Image (cartoon, helix red, strand yellow):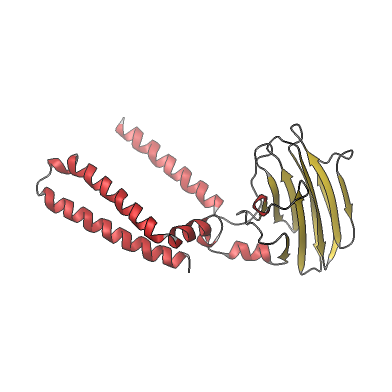
Amino acid sequence: MKRINLTAKIIILLFLAALISLLLAGCRGIFYIPGASYGYYIWEEDSKVFVEWSVDRKDSKFDGRISTDGKITRYKLKEWEEENDVIKVGEDKINFSATLDSKDYSDGFSFTVQDHTYLDFDLKINDGYDLSRINVGGFLENPENNIFRIEKDYFDQLKMKDWYQKRPFSEFFSKLFSNKYFTFIYLFILGIIIIEILRVTVLARRRRKIVWVAISYTMLILVEICIYFILRFLVR
């Protein structure tokens, strides 16, 4: 029975490792759940730029403009309702307006563009801007400006970034390091609690209990120091 449990744990760990590896593999495609996710999702795949949007089962209006210094050669609509949704595609710009409701969860389109150096996006939800609802690339980067620009090689550069430089990892590590006093005090208190639980349970039955407790606290301090330098390296 113990051998079976160990095998099951190993299989679960391998599955989780494989899943994490796939998530960290790069910026190909994007994941969102129509009817649960809310906002715009923009990515590039096979030389096509995808612009899609989704709502969490409530009425919303999505409209925007995309312009470029290149030439838009072709486009394809996704789940488009002609009576409620409008799109106008020119040689160097796209204008669209679409509505979603409790029965229509998502819309979108894809297009190809040639000889360009940038794409400018002006995207609105319910006639207003909400940058936290605009997600760019497989790691869901949020733009900093209402009208934002994506350079031609943006998605290629994003693929080349180390995993810890990509969102949400970069934001997570930056927040930990920016409030490092709270982070390290919290981890130290958590470590003390774990050590004390071990002291009255596992270590209580061991000889030289004081030595083991001293070793545990020394290890806790070394772990804190290692975390400090790791975070400092990750957010440099």
Going by the image, does 8 lie left or right of 122?
left
> In the rendering, at what x and y percent does residue 88 appear?
89, 52
Which quadrant of the structure image shows residue 32? Answer: top right
Q: Residue at x 85, y 43 (%)?
A: 85
Residue 38 position within the rendered picture, expressed as x and y whole percent measured from the top left: 67, 43
Q: What residue lies at 76% left-to-right and 67% top-to-bottom? A: 118
Image height of 194 relative to 66, above or below = above
Percent coordinates x, y for residue 186 in the rendering = 35, 52
Number of marks in picture: 0
Point out the residue furthest to the left here: 207
Q: Is residue 139 left or right of residue 21?
A: right
Q: Quadrant of residue 184?
A: bottom left
Which residue is at a point 48% across and 61% down the rendered structure image?
174
Using the image as rendered, state which of residue 111 and residue 10 is in the foreground.
111
Q: In this rendered view, identify the residue nearer to me: 177 or 49.
A: 177
Q: Residue furthest front?
A: 128
**Residue lying at 35% horizontally and 33% vertically, measured from the top left:** 4
Counting from the top left corner in percent of width and height, residue 71 is at 85, 64
The reply, left or right, for residue 139 in relation to residue 95 is: left
Split into 4 quadrants, where in the image is the N terminus?
Answer: top left
Up the image or down, 35 lies above or below 31; here it is above
